Image (spheres, rainbow, N blue to C red):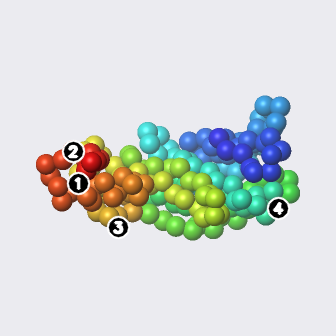
Amino acid sequence: VTGDRSGNGWLYAVEQGGRIIAISPTGELATVPVVDLSDRITAGGEQGLLGLALHPDFRANGRLFVNYTRAEDGATVIAELTVGEDGIADPATERVVLVIPQPYPNHNGGMIAFDAQGMLVIGMGDGGAGGDPDGTLDVRDAVHGRGDSEEQEARDRDRHQPDRELGESEG
């Protein structure tokens, strides 16, 4: 669930199966979804429509961004859609921004949001399967498995000091 930054009280809920539903300030669900992308999404387990971010100027431009699992191959898709004055986004307006292959059907992240500078931030997860079988957590420039910078710096520091536990401070 996310809201736009206008303060008008409207919320937007993501359904894993592929729909985005608007919720009025009084808690009423819209009778028609904002958009239904279920025809292009594989859903279930840790896959589906996983994230929604409204452009910082959403009220003026109607732009929203989604993170979903593509039906044909399980890849993560980041796409932009435009909501019309009627509050509905035509799936035909979809513009794919980024496609990231996923090696496994789980641990695919899904969170997307705009930061304070207006940049779209995408949470990718480690790429799947238990125990990080592809070692993505140890690859600094890997798309999967990236942690925040403090966490990455701790991993890099501790890799060169094997007698310390991960994240243990030097002091």
According to the image, label 4 marks what residue?
A: 60
Residue at 57% in and 42% down = 17
Looking at the picture, tell me which residue is in the foreground, 72 or 106.
Answer: 106
According to the image, label 2 marks what residue?
A: 165
The kind of secondary structure element at disc 2 is: loop
Binning the other alpha carbons within 10 Å of mark 2 as few (below 14), some (14 to 19) or many (20 upward) gives few
Q: Which amino acid lies under the numbered mark 1 shown in the image of this protein? A: Asp
Q: Which amino acid lies under the numbered mark 3 shown in the image of this protein? A: Asp
* CB atoms of marks 3 and 4 within 8 Å: no
The kind of secondary structure element at disc 3 is: loop
**Residue 84, visible in the rendered structure:** no
Q: Nearer the viewer, mark 3 or mark 2?
A: 2
Q: Earlier in the sequence, mark 2 or mark 4?
A: 4
Residue at 50% in and 50% down = 110
Q: Establish if 15 lies above or below 5.
A: above
Instruction: Name the outermost residue toward the top.
Output: 27
According to the image, label 3 marks what residue?
A: 141
Q: Position of residue 28 (x, y in %)?
A: 80, 32
Q: Earlier in the sequence, mark 3 or mark 2?
A: 3
According to the image, label 1 marks what residue?
A: 158
